[in-house]
Amino acid sequence: MYERLRTGTWADGEVALALLDADHGNAAAAVTRMRAEWARGHRSVRVADALGWALYRAGQPKEALEYATRATEEGLRSALFAYHRGEIERALGDQGPARRHVAEALRINPHFSPLLAPRAEATLAVLGEPSTELPKELRPEEAPVAVAVPASKSASASASEKGRGAGPGTPPGAAQPQE
């Protein structure tokens, strides 16, 4: 029985206690508890998620994101893990990823927690809809737009725009001598 406690069930109990501490008690104690499990070699997605959430609740969102990412990218689709990651990303100012992960939590299970599911819905309302505008680095370069001007007007338009008095025989776009 001791072997069973040491290999899985014990870590699961520690995860539950850490999440309880992180949400309702002492986040620093939760971090200590989960760092100890991590150091013991219990590096499951559950431990990664709990450690990430505890770090976030203890005011360390940058370090928390490393563990939350590990928990969500190792194949297990968990509404709780996605919600935790989304809230951590929101704390870091990553609005797009935060919106995506909180929405994913609600898609996986809209009732994943009687306390956290309503918070997830409120978070999505605060984050709003994604922008339809592409970020500058993703926008295609704009080519100059050529405006077609009838030939009969181009000479006089060119002369009036440049103020150089192009004559009637001057071809459109011809260089004018500088005075």
Image (cartoon, rainbow, N blue to C red):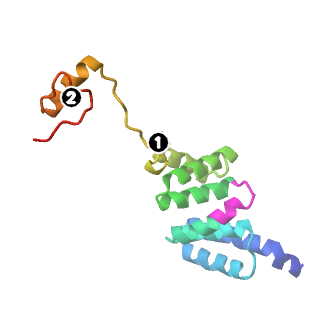
Which residue has dot 2 on it? Answer: 158
Look at 63% across and 46% down and name the residue there.
106
- Which residues make up the magenta segment? 69-78
- Please say whether residue 98 is visible from this viewpoint: yes
Look at 43% across and 48% down and name the residue there.
136
Please name whichever residue, 124 or 12, is drawn nearer the observer in this view of the structure: 124
Q: Residue 1, position in %: x, y?
A: 90, 78
Amino acid at circle 1 = Ser
Q: In the image, which disc is placed on residue 43?
A: none
Amino acid at circle 2 = Ser
What separation in Å lies between label 1 and label 2 (alpha carbons)?
41 Å
Q: Please name which of the two marks, 1 or 2, marks the residue nearer to the observer.
A: 2
Instruction: State yes or no: discs 1 and 2 in contact (Cβ < 8 Å).
Output: no
- Please say whether residue 20 is visible from this viewpoint: no
Please name whichever residue, 133 or 105, is drawn nearer the observer in this view of the structure: 133
Locate residue 178 relative to residue 1 in the image: left or right. Answer: left
Check the picture and name the quadrant holding the C terminus. Answer: top left
* 72 within the magenta span: yes
Please name whichever residue, 69 or 155, is drawn nearer the observer in this view of the structure: 155
Q: Quadrant of residue 150?
A: top left
Q: Residue furthest left?
A: 179
- Disc count in the image? 2
Q: In the image, which disc is placed on residue 131?
A: 1
Q: Quadrant of residue 141?
A: top left
Relative to 1, does residue 112 appear above or below in the rendering? above
For label 1, count other residues whose C-alpha is less than 10 Å away and answer few (under 14), some (14-19) or many (20+). Answer: few
Relative to 139, does residue 51 appear above or below in the rendering? below
* 104 within the magenta span: no
